[in-house]
């Protein structure tokens, strides 16, 4: 089966994760794709194929004769789609010989426009796959899943020499829990690649350092007619605190290596208010400065309104993988060579987010991220081309046969 047909089959399966359930996987529907992939890997000839009770799929391509000493590698992608937008009943639009212009997304009234997505003209002449505007597409990361399975099938039937290769599919990446139950001891790989990015020529090995901050403000609620010198309005304090952060350090005002404070939730009234932030920076020291600044703002609230008026809880989320990968740059160079083998110049840009690969890197599996050819993830404008996925298949095949 080709990568196009696999991709279309996989996106028809509803696998959206849910951060509120507290289970692994977070949604049982992810098993639907897990069972399918488990069966496919067995059918194409992989060994030691298993679907675990936490919805992780593993399969092994044994080393070629004489290559048993080559370091094992892992190729990894995730089965879930983001809870940001509906991933159910995906109805893809397939546009052959795309003209590079604006695309009407079904009857939704939405337009995939060149003005909003300037990469579109570069896709002219390809087979473009979009949504109908009512769901996301699922290219994140079913394009990666389809490319890996297709490359694995090609390798099984190839005479080219290669070391041991592990194929791994995870649940719940979109809610940050993909590596939580990943069994590194099972695969015993020396390094890996997540296949979960944008442009097909991308090799990414830098990501944000990340933390979250939750601020609670306790007010004093009395009748407004008798409030003089008594009322402490928690909601009003919360808005002042939020407004005191720099306007030029929000997601909407930053790019590339610039970090930010991102207010993701705010609720409250006179008596109690809550602010939830995610803090991001590629520089670990600058992230600490952001954490310290928020802590100082909370301290100033307490100085003004009384001790314990405000409380802050900061928790660490993940780290920038570059601190580990910089000592294993040969795996980046291998990916760059693989990309160049397809006539493409590699692009490496800092990931303004995190990946399963970042967490796996700190668990002992150095794991940069490769592009899949998809764009505009997590919403109705998501799109990918068949040719990009085909290129990723070839990139993965090169890595498989040149590792070690």
Image (cartoon, rainbow, N blue to C red):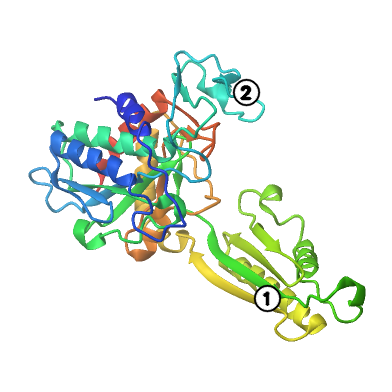
Q: Quadrant of residue 11?
A: top left
- Depth check, front residue: 91 or 404: 91
- Depth check, front residue: 186 or 172: 172
**Residue position for label 2:** 109
Q: Answer whether residue 329 is visible to the viewer in this image.
A: yes
Q: Is residue 319 left or right of residue 271?
A: left
**264 w.r.t. 223: above or below:** above
**23 w.r.t. 41: above or below:** below
**Residue position for label 1:** 295
Where's residue 238, x and y in %? Answer: 75, 67
Mark 2 residue element: loop
**183 w.r.t. 114: above or below:** below
Q: Answer whether residue 401 is visible to the viewer in this image.
A: no
Q: Residues within 10 Å of mark 1 (few under 14, many from 20)?
A: some
Q: Is residue 243 left or right of residue 192?
A: right
Residue found 12% across the figure and 37% down from its top: 45
Q: Is residue 208 left or right of residue 47?
A: right
Q: Which tag is nearer the camera, tag 2 or tag 1? A: 2
Mark 1 residue element: helix
Residue found 66% across the figure and 51% down from its top: 251
């Amino acid at each position: 089966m080709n990568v196009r047909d696999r991709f279309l089959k996989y996106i028809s399966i509803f696998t959206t994760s849910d951060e509120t359930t507290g289970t692994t996987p977070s949604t049982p529907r992810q098993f639907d794709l897990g069972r399918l992939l488990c069966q496919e890997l067995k059918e194409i000839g992989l060994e030691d194929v298993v679907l675990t009770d936490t919805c992780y799929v593993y399969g092994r391509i044994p080393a070629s004769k004489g290559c048993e000493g080559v370091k094992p590698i892992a190729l990894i992608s995730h089965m879930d789609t983001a809870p940001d937008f509906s991933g159910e009943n995906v109805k893809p639009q397939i546009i052959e010989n795309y003209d590079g212009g604006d695309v009407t997304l079904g009857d939704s009234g939405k337009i995939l426009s060149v003005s909003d997505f300037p990469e579109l003209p570069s896709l002219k002449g390809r087979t473009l796959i979009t949504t109908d505007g009512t769901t996301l597409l699922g290219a994140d990361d079913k394009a990666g899943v389809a490319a890996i399975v297709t490359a694995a099938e090609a390798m099984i039937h190839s005479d080219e020499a290669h070391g041991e290769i592990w194929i791994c599919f995870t649940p719940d990446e979109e809610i940050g829990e993909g590596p939580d139950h990943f069994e590194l001891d099972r695969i015993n790989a020396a390094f890996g690649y997540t296949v979960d990015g944008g442009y097909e020529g991308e090799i990414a090995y830098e990501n944000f350092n990340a933390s979250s901050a939750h601020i609670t403000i306790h007010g004093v609620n009395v009748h407004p007619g008798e409030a003089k010198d008594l009322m402490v309005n928690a909601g009003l304090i919360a808005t002042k605190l939020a407004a005191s952060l720099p306007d030029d350090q929000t997601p909407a005002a930053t790019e590339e290596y610039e970090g930010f404070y991102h207010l993701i939730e705010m609720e409250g009234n006179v008596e109690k208010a809550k602010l939830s932030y995610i803090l991001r920076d590629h520089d670990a020291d600058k992230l600490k400065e952001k954490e310290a600044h928020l802590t100082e703002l909370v301290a100033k609230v307490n100085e003004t309104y009384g001790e314990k008026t405000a409380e802050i809880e900061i928790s660490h989320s993940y780290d920038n993988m570059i601190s580990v990968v910089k000592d294993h740059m040969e795996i980046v160079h291998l990916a760059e060579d693989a990309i160049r083998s397809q006539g493409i110049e590699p692009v490496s840009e800092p990931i303004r987010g995190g990946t399963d690969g970042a967490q796996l890197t700190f668990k002992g599996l150095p794991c940069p991220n490769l592009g899949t050819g998809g764009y505009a993830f997590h919403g109705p404008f998501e799109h990918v081309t068949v040719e990009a996925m085909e290129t990723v298949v070839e990139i993965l095949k090169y890595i498989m046969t040149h590792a070690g």
